[in-house]
Structure formats: structure tokens, C-alpha cells
Image (cartoon, grey):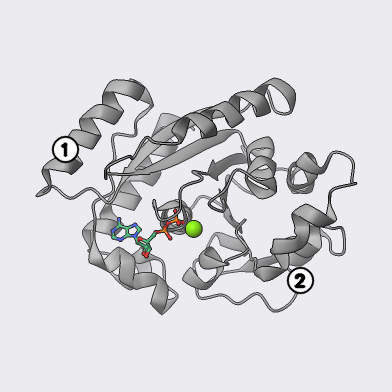
Amino acid sequence: MNKIICIANQKGGVGKTTTAINLASSLAAAEKQTLLIDGDSQGNATSGMGMTSNGNNLYHALIGQAQVNEVILATAIPHLDIITSNQDLIGVEVEFIHIEEREKRLRNLLKSLDKRYDFIIIDCPPSLGFMTVNALVAADFLIVPLQCEYFAMEGLGYLLNTVRLVKAKLNPDLALGGILLTMFDPRNLLSHRVTEDVKKHFGEKVFKTIIPRNVRLSESPSHGLPIILYDIKSRGAIAYMELAQEIIEGGL
Ligand SMILES: Nc1ncnc2c1ncn2[C@@H]1O[C@H](COP(=O)(O)OP(=O)(O)O)[C@@H](O)[C@H]1O
Ligand SMILES: [Mg+2]
């Protein structure tokens, strides 16, 4: 199987990292062999999983200083491994300026993993730069989290245009897996309006599962725990487990 899913949106604070951590954990809880890749130099997916990035990390694998197997770490969750990141990744774009096929570095790394994982989830930084392009080139599917707020769809055209370019030139197999509405607040009229607008625009491409705004979800990273370990009964945990089911059953 080995389905590679990239979580991207160049806007910050829309729920990319929260989705990467909790979707990966929920897939693992459903006994799918899963690898979470932290593709952001801020290392939020790393710390949110309670990991640190002291030794070799994604950067060392990308520049060829380490084998991909040497940068994969086991997490506290059975069936879930991680490749961590930290500030090392900041320089990678500049360091790669003269390297051939630099957009394919991550893709080539992941190829060597063969069929070890059912799902590989890549958390992207808030930009359309080197790491996001590498993730799009490596991925089979893209998930775009959209926060249920004003201007949710603003800037989306740039992302979808980048996807078109990547599809045309570097990865014809890339598909839009779905738009994921996040931080939905049922008491807020705006949340309902944004949901309607997004569904009007993207129709079937919007995941049925909508992630609610949930305090437990925002607390869990500071404890270094995915939501299913922090509070499995919370609405946030239930929503991410439903998303994992939707993805498994929908055949992403
Ligand atoms: N569904 C949610 N409910 C409440 N808080 C959330 C939710 N999703 C994300 N957050 C919080 O919002 C902030 C931004 O989320 P994050 O996943 O880090 O976004 P991104 O990776 O896109 O920048 C974080 O503080 C996170 O804990
Ligand atoms: Mg993030």
C-alpha cells in the first residue's frame, strides 16, 4: 500500500500539525503501520509527539548524511514511527540550490522504504517553498486543512496552482485527497457559513468529518501527547479517529 499523504496549506495556524499528529496516531490506533514525517523546521510535530530531535533527523537524510532507516524513530504509540525535524532544516533550501533534482529528494528517500508502511503522513511548513514542494512531489494525496474562519479560502489558489505545476512537471500521480475543515465552532454563525462556502466550491472533495474547535486538542501538544493518549473521550479525539476511518474506508 504505502500511501503518502501530505498535509499542506501555506497559511499558518490552520491545523496542519494538529492534523498530521492526530491523523497519524489514529491510523496507527487502527493498526495501520504509519510513519509521521515532520517537514517543518519549527519541529512542532516532533515536540507534539513528545519527541526531541537531537541526533540524526530529516535534514541529515535529505542531505545524504544519514540513511533513511537511521532517522526513523519509534514513538510511544504502537504502529507509529516518526522522522523528526528541528532548525537544522532552515538552511536546506539554500544548501540545495545547485543540487540536481532537488525537488525529488524526499520522494527518493521514501522510495527506499518500499512497502513497510500503510500510510506516510508529511506535515508541511507554512510556505510553498522547498519542503512543501518536496512533500507534494513525494505524495500520492494532498490534504488541505482550512480553518473555519474568515478568509479560509484566501490564498488557496496559490496552493492549487503549485499542485498543478507539480502534477504537470514532477508528480503526475498527485491527487487532491480532500479539504479538511478544522476548528469548527457550532455556536459561531461564521463557522457554518465558511463550511457552506467551502462545500459549494469543493463539493465531494470536502471530508465528511469536520474537526471541531476543542480545547483538549490545543492542550495536548504541550504534554507531548497526541489526543488519543491525552483524552481519548474528547470531541477532538473522536473527530480525528473518524477522519482516519473515512480515509481508510474511502480508499485514500
Ligand atoms: N481543532 C482545534 N481546536 C482547538 N485548537 C486547535 C485545533 N486545531 C489546532 N488548534 C491549535 O491552533 C494552533 C495552530 O494549529 P497547528 O496545528 O499548529 O496549525 P499549523 O500547523 O497549520 O500552523 C495550535 O495552537 C493548535 O494547538
Ligand atoms: Mg505546523
Viewer-nearest residue: 241 or 37: 37
Amino acid type, label 2: Asn
Q: Quadrant of the N terminus?
A: top right
Mark 2 = which residue?
A: 56
Residue 200 in sight here: yes
Q: Is residue 220 above or below residue 58?
A: below
Residue 139 lies, with reference to residue 185, above or below; the image says: above
In the rendered image, residue 225, in percent from the top left (x then y), is placed at 42, 72
Q: What is the C-alpha distance between the residues marked 1 and 2?
A: 44 Å
Q: Quadrant of residue 210?
A: top left
**Dot 1: element:** helix
Q: Which residue is mark 1?
A: 192
Q: Which class describes the residues within 10 Å of circle 1: few (<14), some (14-19), or many (20+)?
A: some
Height in image: 210 above or below 37?
above
Please report the residue visible at 78 percent of the width from the left and 49 percent of the height from the top: 109
Q: Earlier in the sequence, mark 1 or mark 2?
A: 2
* Residue plotted at (31% across, 64% down): 217
Instruction: Pinpoint residue 121: horizontal percent, then vertical percent.
Output: 55, 49
Name the one closer to the observer, 130 or 205.
130
| Residue 184 placement (x, y as % from top left) | 23, 48
The secondary structure type at the circle numbered 2 is: loop
User: Is the shortest distance between ligand 1 and the CB of mark 1 under 8 Å?
Assistant: no
Whether ligand 2 has any atom under 8 Å from the Cβ at mark 2 is answered as no
Circle 2 residues within 10 Å: few <14, some 14–19, many ≥20: some
**180 displayed left or right of 33:** left
Residue at (57, 51) in percent of width and height? 124
- Check disc 1 and give the amino acid type: His
Q: Is residue 30 visible?
A: no
